[in-house]
């Protein structure tokens, strides 16, 4: 039986090109079509020399595929995705266009009216650690944002189990590739190098996603979440440090409590191929090019607060790798297929 | 009248060498003596080519000075400082040896019994924004740690005015020079580059300082502080993001409240030569080589939390520059003397 | 007597903003006017937070000044400079518009016909180490390019003295600020970080300058120069490594020859305030923010080749600092005025 | 039939740990033993979190293997390798201990008398592009140094074909991982970041290797080679730019000559799986984690010089990847087995 055919819409951004790297090496699917607006007609290897062995030409429109991954920017992605869905093609959408369940969020956070509210209802939020079954039977999967992936995985066991008060602070440090390939003074080397700064304190677009998903984990007690993203001078990686007071009477703020916490996290993620609960603060460096999310939960014994830290490669578990994890589930393949390459260190 | 003579104890670490840069260019003092253990006998410019114009030889012991800045490591610094104090010499100690008012903190945080508790009482915590008068008449000033400088300046107006609940989370991102010049796998280029990580979550040594000073600003309501330091791949700079719930009934969580908050911070720091309250999240890049602390206070309108951010150069306002600010006050010089050089950008 | 009034044309690029930093702190001139096209009307400190203390508003056109520094791009600079020269105002032009003595070079290297060939004849190439007297009496000084500054200073003593054959290879490694503030995929952080590459191997625009000036040092034996510029992931700094065979019978390829070479370089630069001949390979790090050029000449004893290395801060000695050095000479001020600040290390 | 068993001697340096990454994912060999002095007894994943899935414990001595890769430092490697060879085990030695054919080079370049001159004669220099057949039948392969790999591959076609004069200048720019994991002030983050410098101008230890191998390509005209290594602030990658005058009468210094040159290089490397001859200057970024060597030959038309540039990942093609390429040949496996992973970009 021939392998399923897959395609990438907008291969020329960082999520798209990372999809191309991973899909072209995937043993159980055939990457047959990649699109890109300004680069249509060029060979993939001309635009991206590291992909010279991938013999594909960038096209203006997607070819015949069984499943497409869209790496288009938000708003534009929905336009590409809707016709494919109508044709019965499976889609993993890396943009935000199908992540938020409440259509009214789109005008306020993204500045447009959602063009296909009926699809929004069918779309599944593609964090396999929470929605594995739903993803497996979905036609349309909304791949989570990079920050939400790290934040939700750091906090899910604590929120779900009710061991914390819902007063949550999330402080994330991202490398520059998260800001995309589009030119911008903030991502100009000379401006971004040797600099650290916070941004989007009025509300980053990934915040409603985080609120939605952590809220669903414990509907009876909606969380109050402050999310502060930061840029730090590195190419890949998101380190997320989350803080919340322990709920009284659940886990003690002592060394034994810390062990219980670790145990709780390990149980929560016990069968997860891509979440590794660790006993020391993780380094983003150990995720370079790899789909693993390291999670380190601990308790600040002096104050009785949970500190939960996650480290991911924003372009892999935070984008292309997670898309492939979803794709594998949707195609009935073992979830980790094509995602086994170890991180590159140092 | 001749200029006061000053010396640097342990010029060979990063705080020491930065002191040498700033003091050798200071118009109102004469840098006459610098010490260094392993490098004694060498010319300063041999060890540090950028200081080739500073015609000093590294000595084993400090020469005759009116004021000494000690950049020795903790525990060793007290040993050098005590005899100088007994001789009537003024001292700015950059180490932690005279920062904590409670001697019992030294065994638990620093692993030694304090050798001169009587001096601890006389020492002044050298954050001029809080203790300008005391510094001016002190013989011994304990220069604040780099993290405490950023954290206290970010939070002091909010704590002092009582507009926040004392439930404080402080998340700091530091460049590698803060970890010193001593060799260490964590600061090896290949390990630290392209990496972000948290450390010392069990309690960084700068935490008791932060607790002490924020506590003194509002003794009636001792703060509960979680402090998480992080290393990010840059040479200089500390960005500190602090979070706390607004106290009810003080400042509203709306746009007007934000303006009031800004006003409150601006009033608090209105005459400060080295604190600049700004309306946008600051960049560490804008402090490179300079003694300014940028502070940006804002309110997360969705949750009613204060977010207060500070940016400093850890080796200047976080160490050598602040030491000179203290020295100026102790010598009766205008506080900003020798500290006027603009930051180097980009 | 009042201080000379100076202005900056196009303050918004990296050379311009570095000029603003240095001129605003210069003790003997008054920076009274700065221009910038898209930013006209804004306060300088709004656009560049590190300059908040410089109380100037960016203007559309230059005000009344005694001397102007132009940091406009080539071709556009001449348009601004010509009218100023006609009004009798002194000008240091940081662009390439008056560097090449042969007008026919402009169409081929820069793609335009020179608009003012008569001024080209009057202009002085502003490398004070070679043209100090001419600069002092010039009305129009062409500030050298960043690469030529490093390359010429590395090679001038060897070329002038005839100790090398004129078969010269120049390999330069530049930080990204040399590529300017204009957005470009090559200077996007994510592309430039963790990358090294050569470019412009067909002939960088700085090559004719290098050929012209090294040629003038020894007109009887025109050099054959290969120049290969490279980008390496840092913000500031140019390291230039130049290679040429020793001429036979001049300096021996042995340890004694190395000492003679060092002596020859030290004599050549003996009174230079901004060239430091050193016995070890220099580091660009030691020039950060400073006007010094470190030069290290040595002999490859196995092959009898000269290796001459220079290190500069491309924005200081390679642009704004050198412009001020020229300005000082043109205004009759001591050459090093306002350029004494030590480099920032680490 | 069971897979060949392989081991790594000294897994704790950067070449060793990169071998572990690549060998543990290799489909046709079984990585069964890894050694490390100070870390013996620890699990590999404890020391290197990215290898947590590799279930091996670091041992004091190598276990039973068919082939061992030694990543010991020079001098110490020979001591480990000799007994293995005597036992009939195949060895790829990543150290320099068997690279130089002339035993008298060891005292002068490496400071020790070679302990096994008889093995030196049997050892094959493991650059498969030059010695594929010999490697395939060798028991002991000396894996080339990182700089020689880039330099020889850049120059081999030109030297072999006689199109250049043997007056060669090689200027290499290396990332810091090439300097190893041992602590050292030069590789301390704060010293190495934002810095470029040359080193070892008196003769880097990789120079005799380069001389030996380029000399063997054209024994009738021994080359005169200047080699200047540089450190630039990145983790991985070596960019080598080599220069030599074209020999007269071979290839013209015009655009047609450039095409001939390209053709000559393409023919030379036509069947090579890991050398890619490209028409534009290559970027080290495109080799991250991958075994490819990009080579770009061109002619400086003004001066008639060859400029040949290569880009490699110093830990892959410059160390561990090339060792595996050699191992594959020695074990009769297809040469590219286990080396197919695409580079990670950006």
Image: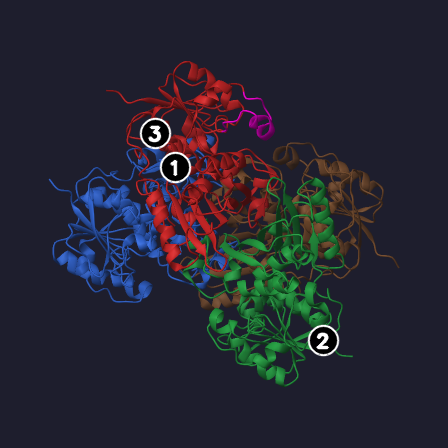
Chain colours: A green, B red, C blue, D brown
Residue, x 57% and y 37% (percent of image)?
B204
Q: Is residue C174 above or below residue A127?
A: above
Q: Is residue B102 magenta?
A: yes
Q: Secondary structure at mark 2?
A: helix
Frontmost residue, C257 versus B201: B201
Residue, x 78% and y 44% (percent of image)?
D57
Q: Which residue is mark 3?
A: B133
Q: Are marks 3 and 1 on the same chain?
A: no
Q: Is residue A314 magenta?
A: no
Q: Are the two marked residues, 2 and 3, in contact with CB atoms closer than 8 angstroms?
A: no
Q: Locate residue B196, reporting x and y percent.
A: 56, 49
Magenta-highlighted residues: B100-114
Residue, x 57% and y 54% (percent of image)?
A168
Q: Which residue is mark 1?
A: C250
Q: Locate residue B206, reporting x and y percent.
A: 52, 36
Q: Secondary structure at mark 1?
A: loop
Residue A137, numbered circle: 2
As measured in the structure, the alpha-carbon distance from the residue carrying label 1 to the one carrying label 2 is: 82 Å
Q: Is residue C47 above or below residue B238?
A: below
């Amino acid at each position: 039986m021939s392998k399923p055919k897959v395609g990438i819409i907008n291969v020329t951004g960082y999520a798209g090109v990372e999809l191309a790297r991973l899909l072209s090496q995937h043993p159980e699917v055939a990457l047959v079509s990649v699109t890109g607006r300004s680069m249509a007609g060029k060979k993939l290897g001309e635009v991206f020399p590291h992909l010279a062995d991938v013999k594909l030409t960038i096209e203006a429109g997607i070819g015949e595929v069984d499943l497409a991954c869209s790496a288009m920017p938000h708003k534009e992605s929905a336009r590409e995705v809707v016709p494919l869905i109508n044709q019965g093609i499976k889609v993993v959408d890396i943009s935000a266009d199908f992540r938020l369940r409440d259509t009214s969020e789109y005008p306020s956070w993204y500045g447009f009216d959602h063009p296909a509210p009926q699809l929004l209802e069918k779309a599944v939020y593609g964090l396999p650690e929470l929605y594995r079954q739903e993803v497996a039977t979905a036609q349309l999967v909304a791949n989570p944002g990079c920050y939400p992936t790290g934040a939700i995985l750091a906090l899910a066991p604590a929120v779900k189990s009710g061991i914390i008060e819902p007063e949550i602070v999330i402080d994330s440090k991202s490398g520059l590739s998260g800001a995309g390939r589009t030119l911008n003074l903030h991502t100009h080397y000379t401006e971004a190098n040797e600099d650290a700064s916070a941004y989007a304190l009025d509300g980053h677009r990934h915040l409603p996603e985080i609120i939605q998903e952590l809220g669903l984990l414990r509907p009876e007690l909606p969380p109050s979440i402050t999310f502060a993203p930061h840029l730090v001078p590195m190419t890949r990686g998101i380190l997320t440090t989350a803080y919340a007071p322990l709920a009284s009477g659940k886990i003690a703020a002592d060394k034994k409590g810390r062990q219980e916490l670790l145990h709780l996290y390990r149980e929560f993620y016990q069968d997860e191929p891509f979440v590794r609960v660790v006993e020391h603060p993780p380094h983003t460096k150990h995720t370079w090019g790899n789909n693993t999310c390291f999670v380190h939960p601990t308790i600040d014994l002096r104050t009785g607060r949970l500190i939960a830290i996650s480290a991911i490669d924003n372009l892999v578990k935070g984008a292309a790798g997670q898309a492939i994890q979803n794709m594998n589930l949707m195609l009935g393949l073992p979830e980790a297929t094509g995602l086994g390459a170890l991180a590159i260190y140092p």
